[in-house]
Amino acid sequence: MLILGGAALAASLIVAIYAAGAALYGAIEGDRRWVESARRAVYALAALLTVAVVVIESAFIGDDFSFEVVASHSSTTTPTFYKLTAMWSSQEGSLLLWAWVLSLASSGVLYLTRRRLRELVPYATAILMGVATFFIALMLTSANPFTELSPAPPEGAGLTPLLRNPYMVIHPPMLYTGYVLLSIPFAFAVAALITRRLDAAWIRSTRSFALTAWAFLGLGLLLGSRWSYEELGWGGYWGWDPVENAALMPFLVATAYIHSIMVQERRGMLKVWNVSLICGAFVLALVGTFLVRSGILESIHAFGASTVGGPLLGLIAVVAIGSAVLIVSRLDELRSERRIGSALSREAIFLVNNLLLVGLAAVVFWGTFFPLIAEAFTGTRSSLGPPWFERYATPLGVGLVLFTGIGPLLAWGKLSPGAALRLLRWPALAAVVAAIALVLASDAADSPWALFLFSFSAFTLVALGQEFWRAAASRRALTGEGIATALPRAIARNRRRYGGYVVHAGIAILLVGVAASSSFQTNRDLRLDIGESAVVGDYTVTYERLASDPGSERIAFAATLDVDKEGRDFATLAPARNYYPTMDPSTGPVGRFFEGEATSEIGLRSGAGEDFWAAFQPDLRPLDDDIARGNKVFADINAPGTPAEERAVLFGFRDEAIRRLADTYAEDPPPATFRVIVNPLVVWIWIGALVGLGGAAFALWPSAAARRRVRAAYAARLGREVAGP
Amino acid sequence: MEFLIALALVALVAAFVTVPLRRRGAERLDASEAERAELEALKLTRYREIRDAEADHAAGKLSDEDFERLDRELRAEAIEVLRRLDRLDEAERKAPGRDRDAAGESLD
Amino acid sequence: MDPSRKRKIRLVAALTAAVLLATALVYTSFSASTEAREPSQVLASGSGETYDLTGKVVPGSIERTDSDLRFRISDRDGSEALPVRYTGTVPDPFRDGREVIVTGRLMDGTFVAEHDSLITKCPSKFQEEAEADPEHVMIEE
């Protein structure tokens, strides 16, 4: 199977190069046959890469350890689900995933535009295939998924325990899909620049791809944050880690882009800004892909320093410089047709929101790459921690929440001051009331920024509600329907707008959760003995008992925590610590079970008002003597001269000994360390994000009007052709 | 055995990809089609703007006179786009710029 | 004021704001950042400053007491080493030989770390370990 996979990969390189060349040739010579051949080549590329993916996944499922990737990332004891997803935990597999998704997305967009945009499509094809060629060539030279391991080992290394989690499994594909989908509007933007067709067609045809890319990036960010919160022992969801930031930056720029293209469509302005934004977004997507793989910045995410970093940096440079040169050369065609008429218009607000978003992206960029910048200037690496990021992100975030509400309130074009006051009345009132209520009824005033954010979110949510209300009301005035029918119908008529409003609502809710959980958290490290209690905020935590669970893949120690709130039973949590064995024989036949990777299971009780979060760290020092003794007693297991049958018997005894060791420890354990966090309003972060994604899906869904338009286009075509020469 | 499968795949791909190339005679890209695409996109955007302005007016955001002024502007722009599209249609009917293959069949 | 003048004023205002923000950014970043130093560099520069101490955990040096975690960090090439005293979350990948970063300052010969500042790099591959141990051992159920 290695040969088939390798052949498919090599063939896909040739096909990708051919597709780019044929598309360019067809564009320059004006011969449509070559463009069509290029499109077929893209379809063929998707097919070939699918073959490659199927070959690899079959190897994973079939435990074919002659594949080096399979041997180093899977094992016979890995559960089937994680065998399938282990592919993208490796450098090689994730590059293959990138290329595969790119080929599928390219096939999709070329299929959808097969009869349209005939001037743009060839150049866009060439760009997309150029990127694909790069990734395939990278695989073939530095990170080939079809490398053979000879002789094939009987067992594989297994999947890193930290990755054995459903969130960690979907998070990379979602993020990669987001990155890859950004290449579509990018390719069409470059094609538009080359052909000097910069008005409307390139934006209109790639808007859905941009919005979908945005949604996938958001989903990837959400999954990563949720994983961090639910699985890691620090209880946070965002650490301003370089790799987190690398996914956030294209997300922010894509958000700005989605808004500013609306301004271009209506006012014919911001053309330079828009092409720059989408080129920037794609460059940032490549930077994100690069950061994880290059080891150039200290991050807990890194795949580790590898040979892939250099070439990726080269691609980034080519794309960035090429885009800049192309844009500058077309500045004439990119001149604005009109100006922003009034400050009291949606266009003006979109401009402000763009500046805030791009400003935030710039801050994140500077902070992320600061270690490299500092090293260039001062010779030493310095890094910036979360406090620095928060200093700038907080005011920008608060401003964004406010404008998220003002934008929907305004109209395209000048709003009369009277109308503006009328529209702002209720939201402004809500903001003031919320602020006063919070100051009086809670300690929200302790954190001024959080107070601003809550107040502005109230403004935004009321403003959005007002918009939905007005939509329903004006439809009722026309049709006399009841509110229950008027509202859905009014919304369905303009999915893009109201879907967008739902996204805004989701963001406002999400930021409320972020503000509350960052500013009003209670965080305690406790050291408890069995039976001992401690008080954290309104809660009383009692460490009841410890249970041990030695399993085939890991040894787990689970603590039972009884949590009471204000005297009444609240929850029984079971935070645990899982110990996975290591391959390293120097730790000893018994010691290896306690010296390998360890993961945490968090005890979590979520509520609408706050989350109760607990992590557990047992004190394994009392086991040290027994482990050392066990290592001596069972030393023959590793000794080279031991016959196989004796070894098997020793394994049996050793396993029994470890089981007894774990059970005895659990019966009378020493005091353990617990980290307990009471986190207000965290659940609203996840809810807000899901609402936002739902809004995006709604906005993307083709409406009845769009379907009618497609039918009308066919009718028009028929009309033209029937008329004939 | 694997070699054969790989070979078959490559042959299939080559055959599939070269189908258009085996047709006789170059097929010109229609220059007017790009212009039409731009105009169509502009037209649809203008329609959306007209609808949005109506909705904004119905929702009370635009005063009557602001709305009338805006509506007039937008409709004028939309009509201009429609005119340009019509001119394009006429030019196409007169000139032999249509995509055709050697047999004279339209490829649209 | 005619519209083109208004536009120019707006442009100048926007650019000024951008320049101010950029200056604030650059200025605060240099003063708010912590330098990354290896143990040999920290020893050379003496105590006082807060640094991000980077290096490898010296095998066998990890000691957990009731109140904190103690271990030694050595330069990546294994030359100098420093004792570290740390409180807070210990990341899951933390163990002998791993690359870590911990923020703190040198006090009386011990690097006293800030609470929760320990970061451990994820191991990149298990390949070498698998090769060293041909029998993948598990507890059989």
Image: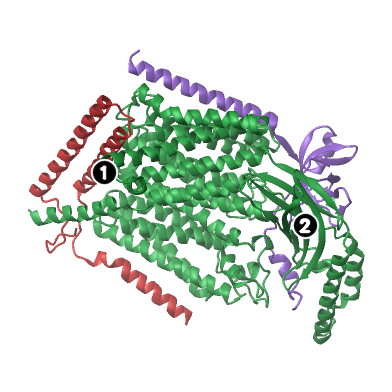
Chain colours: A green, B red, C purple
User: Is residue A629 left or right of A722 when viewed as pictured?
Assistant: right
Image height of B79 relative to A29, above or below = above
Question: Which numbered dot is residue A479?
Answer: 1
Image height of A497 relative to A55, above or below = above
User: Is residue B107 left or right of A69 when viewed as pictured?
Assistant: left
Image height of A114 relative to A367, above or below = below
Question: Which numbered dot is residue A318?
Answer: none
Q: Chain letter of disc 2? A: A
In front here: A24 or A699?
A699
The residue drawn where x is 63% and y is 67% is A73
User: Is residue A344 left or right of C126 when viewed as pictured?
Assistant: left
Who comes first in sequence, dot 1 or dot 2?
1
* Residue at mark 2: A561
Query: Disc 2 marks which amino acid?
Result: Leu
Image height of A125 relative to A664, above or below = above
In front here: B37 or A169?
A169
> Residue A655's x, y, as percent?
81, 76
How crowded is the residue under tag 2: few (<14 C-alpha within 10 Å), some, or many (20+)? many
> Residue A75's x, y, as percent?
65, 72
The residue drawn where x is 41% and y is 41% is A258
